[in-house]
Image (cartoon, grey):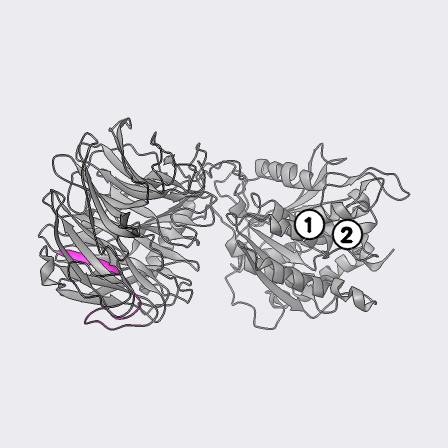
Amino acid sequence: MSWKSSVTLAASLALAGALALAGTSSATAVTSATAPAAPTAPAAPGVPALSQAKTAAAPASQLVPGHVDTDAVAGGIDYTTYLPAGFDADAAERYPTLYLLHGRGDTQAAWQQVAPKLDAMIADGQVPPLIVVMPDAPWSGRGSYYVDSLYTGGAAGTSPGQAVETAFTSDLVDHIDATYPTVDDRAGRAVGGYSMGGAGALRFATVHQDLFSSALVLSPAVYVPSTPADSSTREFGAYGRGDALYDEARYQELAYPAALEAFDPALPVHLFIAVGDDEYANPKPEDAVHDLDYEAATLYNRAKRVPGITAEMRTYDGGHDWDVWARGFAEGLTDIGPRLSTTPPTPFTGTQTGSAGDDRASGILTLADGSVVEAITAPGDAWGHRSAGGTDILVQKRSTSGAVQWTTAIASPLNERAYGLVEGEDGSVIVGGYQRVDHAGAQNDDVLAAAVSADGTVLWTTTAGDPAAADRAYSIASDGAGGAFLAGYTSGRVGGATSAGDKDALVVHVGRDGAVAGTHQFGGAGEDKSLTIARAGDGRLALGGVTTGAMPGATAHGGTDGWVAGFSDDLTAGPSFVAQIGTDSSDQVSALLARGDGWQAAGFTGGALATTPSAGGNDAFVAEVDGAGTVSGLRQYGTPGDDRAAALVAGAGDATLLVGHTDGRFQASAGSVDVFALDLAADGSIRTSTQFGSVARDGADEYDEANLFAAAAGADSVQIQGLTYGAVEGVTNAGGGDVFLSTVAFAVSGAPGEPSTPTTPTSPANPAVPGGPNTGGGTGGSGVAGSSAGSTASALALSGTQLGQIAAFALLALAAGALLALRRHRGRGPLETTVR
């Protein structure tokens, strides 16, 4: 039998020596009353983490034997569960779960020896308390490779194969979730293993994405394009078929290249790969590609290029033994442990609509009588409307009970797209966006405004722009007199203006009768777009957007910058101020809100707009801009991922609801990109945070451009409309991107400083809300092509005191979240979660 045929028990016992050198103690079978040790500093660079464990007694834990019956494998599955110190099965706390798979020839006992290291890491705060499951795999001569074997032969020393993969990923996981208080969601579940177990962990994570969000892959026994002649993969029937112990076609079906080819980027997975630099060296030069250090590097370089997979790789001094695996376990768990959700995600509830194509959210408006008007842009049949060709704008009004009162299309054989709704006169609404127009054979986009009466009749449509160039509106605001202001860009000349550069910001005023009452075009030598517009009750206007250079009278900071410009109702006077906001990275203003004598602006930054450390990736930001254009109160809100603000809603006591999208975690993550809503106090501190979505991408398109609108829907709630590539609870996606509509709690009116009570997003109830210039039509929904996003670090603009407040709130939110009932989600339907 070759070296690959067995990872001996002696090698497993070597871990005990490594742990003894680390000064750790053995876990006990009884929960200890010892208080957790104080957190310690991270391991020093270049020193194995195991060697730095504290010599003081770590909190005791439990190792509990278990068994689950299953029809998939003979004899069922024996396993041992590690339960962390302080574990209480009857408490409300929920735990993430790690499954650890042993190597060829070993037993579950091999992994049990890491319990002392787990004690120390949990006590030191390196990883959250978690449940660790260590199953035994005796089938196929302890060489099952954790796959479903099709071998049925009876060669000497062999036994018929078993459906090991099915047993583990279905019956064992179900049993553990039913037995222990786990976070029953992929975001709270990881898998790891060494050698054969590393191959199994890689397969489980990449094939069963609905179950696992990360994997610890140590010296994985994986081979491409095929297995070496003396590999145990050929000896025991794991990859066999019929009487053949090994079937090449079967191996190719189960090998990781097939899994990577079929990988769904909507369910991201993180891999930590580690290997020794003294792994067995195949004697034949042509087999050097099958040395496990070579194979691990090949795996890493292939996996990290797959959309949806992130990976880390470490090469340690050592061979195919516990000197490497113990170190890889410690560093790998430090990497994947903090990624595991300790609370279940928020339920994604509400309504959803769409055509078979790729639809877009286009605005939401709650009228004074409580009825709701919603707009979507659809490339196919939807809401009973037969597509006119291209993309059509559909506007629908629903009563307070949710009954559809009318549906109206604004459509032509070419394209239309809407970017918001505002109230017109006599119960009408005005839709803003753009329409592709055939100008004597030259087809270009023009700014579009269309009025729809209270009974659903299209009263008028108006387009504006340069017939020879592209002109678009990305936001709309009521003019307070039955008309509207629209903001966007032109790549030509509008109203006799002179073009300043590639694209100029553009504002268009359309009167109550649909006639163009005024336009203004302005910008610098670069590409300038207005993405948002807001109007105060006294007639002041503000536009915000993005520029690749310097706006008139302003200074460029580098990369792309955000900007805010002030106007009056008389556009001919030009801007009263221009304030440019930026770093040397990518920055953008996406939403505006009238506040007192000034404005509140929100967007995202890839740099450091404030003085505190970066949260990583892009951060959402909020800034105050006074009537003279002075910027103050810059604050950033972020995770290590990509966080972008898209909408603002005014709350009681000068509070603000900040809405956007993130691929990080303000709360438990639901999928690849989620929607977030931060309830900000008047001083900018976070009072409550909500994150929700499907397992797919929500709130942003595939280019990470926001497609979100938010509007007050009563005294205590806000409606959020947006794009989803998944589905809300109980709904099937119609195809491509659909449009969801959810309601979240927020104190639109109430006592100053009183936070809203977070609740699960619900289907819109259409509560009444007073009309007004800042509540109609929703804000956000930029979704603008060409607004590039930076990937450099960003900063969290919060003081130490405010960080302490946020941390205290986070602890309270986690405690509240632990009280929530869990429901299974395994990619079979919409994710169910709870707002904290």
Q: Report the Cα–Cα distance between label 1 and label 2.
A: 11 Å
- Identify the mark nearer the N-term, 1 or 2: 2
Q: Secondary structure at mark 2?
A: loop
| Image quarter in which the C terminus is found | top left
**Residue type highlighted by circle 1:** Gly
Q: Which residue is painted at 34% across and 48% down in the image?
A: 707
Q: Residues within 10 Å of mark 1 (few under 14, many from 20)?
A: many
Camera-nearest residue between 56 and 674: 674
Quarter of the image where one finds residue 65: top right
Q: Which residue is painted at 42% across and 40% down in the image?
A: 357
Q: Residues within 10 Å of mark 2 (few under 14, many from 20)?
A: many
Q: Which mark is residue 104?
A: 2
> Where does the image place residue 209, in percent across and percent down from the top left?
57, 46
Query: Can residue 181 be found in the magenta stretch?
Result: no
Q: Is residue 621 visible?
A: no
Range shown magenta: 541-557
Quarter of the image where one finds residue 785: bottom left
| Image quarter in which the N terminus is found | bottom right
Vertical arrangement, residue 334 with respect to residue 105, above or below: below
> Where does the image place residue 59, in percent across and percent down from the top left?
58, 55
Camera-nearest residue between 561 and 176: 561
> Where does the image place residue 57, in percent across and percent down from the top left?
60, 60
**Residue type highlighted by circle 2:** Arg
Direction from residue 756 to residue 180 in the image, left or right = right
Q: Is residue 686 visible?
A: yes
Q: Which residue is painted at 47% across and 40% down in the image?
A: 92
Vertical arrangement, residue 386 with respect to residue 614, above or below: above
> Where does the image place residue 122, in percent across and percent down from the top left?
55, 56
Direction from residue 305 to residue 807 in the image, left or right = left
Quarter of the image where one finds residue 452: top left
Q: Which residue is mark 1?
A: 200
